[in-house]
Amino acid sequence: MIEGPAIAVMAVSGCTAAVLVVRAIADAAVRHREKDARVAEATAMQPNDARMARLELAVEAIAVEVERISEGQRFTTRLLSEAVQKPAPRLERPGQINTPH
C-alpha cells in the first residue's frame, strides 16, 4: 500500500492537473467569445450592397470627369505649344526716313 508522502504527492499532482485542465478550458472559452465579438464587429462594419453600388457609380463618374479635364488640358497645351512654334508676322520696315530736326 501507498503511505504518507506518496499519497500527498499524488494528491498535489492530481489537484494541479485538475487546475490546469480547468484553466485551459476557461482560456478556450474566453478566446471563443473574443473571436465571436470580433466577427460581429467586422460584420457590422461591412457596408451593404446598395451602398457599395452607389460608391462604385460615384467613382466611375469621377473617373469620367477626370478624363474630360485631362483631355482639355492636353488640348490647351497643344494649342499653346503650336502658338509658340509659329513665328510672329513681321512688319515691313520702311526704307530711309528723313525726320526734321
Image: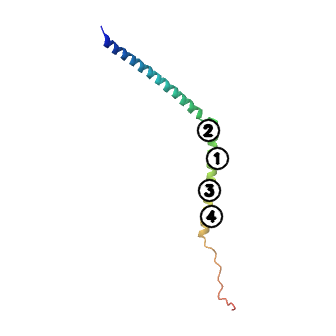
Say if 25 sits above or below 66 in the image: above
* Residue drawn at (53%, 27%) of the image: 36
Q: Quadrant of the C terminus?
A: bottom right
Which comes sooner in the sequence, label 2 or label 4? Answer: 2
Which comes sooner in the sequence, label 1 or label 3? Answer: 1
Q: Is residue 72 left or right of residue 12?
A: right
Quarter of the rendering containing residue 80: bottom right
Cα distance in 3D space between marks 4 and 1: 27 Å
Mark 2 and 4 residues: CB-CB less than 8 Å, in contact? no
- The amino acid type of the residue labelled 3 equals Glu
Residue 61 is marked as: 1
Mark 2 and 3 residues: CB-CB less than 8 Å, in contact? no
Q: Nearer the viewer, mark 2 or mark 1?
A: 2
The kind of secondary structure element at disc 2 is helix
Residue named by callout 3: 71
Say if 39 sits above or below 89 in the image: above
Residue named by callout 4: 79
The kind of secondary structure element at disc 3 is helix
